[in-house]
Image (cartoon, rainbow, N blue to C red):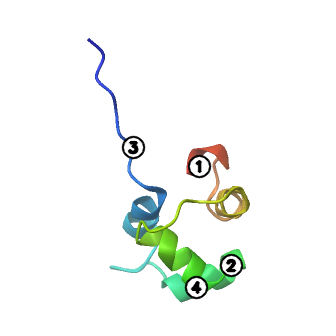
Amino acid sequence: MTRMYNPPHPGAVLADTVLRKDGGITVTEFAKRLRVSRVALSRVVNGRAAVSAELAIRLAAALGGSAESWL
């Protein structure tokens, strides 16, 4: 039997790797870099919203990788 893998929410990935805990940046700073609203990014980071196609493209441009990996 194959086990299913439940990947983390993209917001959890951002919170763990990019945003400030020890040396990262704030949601406000990262939202400005992405040219999205702080509220929109905060909703994704807190798991209350999904990543839109547009945000996925912006995340890929800012962080590398593909937009598909953020969806």
How many residues crowd around disc 1 within 10 Å: few (fewer than 14), some, or many (20 or more)? some
Three-letter residue code for mark 2:
Val
Residue toward you, 50 or 38: 50
Q: Residue sitting at 61 percent across and 61 percent down?
A: 63
State the SS at label 2.
loop
Front residue of this view, candidates 9 and 61: 9
Seen at 68% across and 78% down, the residue is 36
Marks 2 and 4 sit apart, C-alpha to C-alpha, by 7 Å
**Which amino acid type corresponds to the residue marked 3 in the rendered image?**
Pro
The answer to whether marks 3 and 1 mark residues whose Cβ atoms lie closer than 8 Å is: no
Q: Position of residue 19 (x, y in %)?
A: 45, 75
Residue at disc 4, secondary structure: helix
Q: Residues within 10 Å of mark 3 (few under 14, many from 20)?
A: few
Q: Which residue is mark 3?
A: 7
* Secondary-structure class at tag 1: loop
Would residue 69 appear left or right of 5 to someone viewing this image?
A: right
What amino acid type is highlighted by mark number 4? Arg
Q: Is residue 50 above or below residue 46?
A: above
**Label 4: few (<14), some (14–19) or many (≥20) C-alpha neighbours in 10 Å:** some
Q: Are marks 2 and 1 in contact (CB under 8 Å)?
A: no
Q: Position of residue 5 (x, y in %)?
A: 34, 33
Q: Earlier in the sequence, mark 2 or mark 1?
A: 2
Kindly identify which numbered label has been placed on residue 20. Answer: none
* Above or below for 10 versus 35: above
Q: Residue shown at 58%/60% (left/top)? A: 51
Which amino acid does the dot numbered 1 rest on? Answer: Leu
Give coordinates of residue 54: x percent, y percent: 73, 61
Q: CA distance from mark 3 to mark 2?
A: 24 Å
The residue singled out by tag 2 in the image is 36
Mark 3 vs mark 1, CA separation in Å: 11 Å
Question: Label 4 belongs to which residue?
Answer: 38
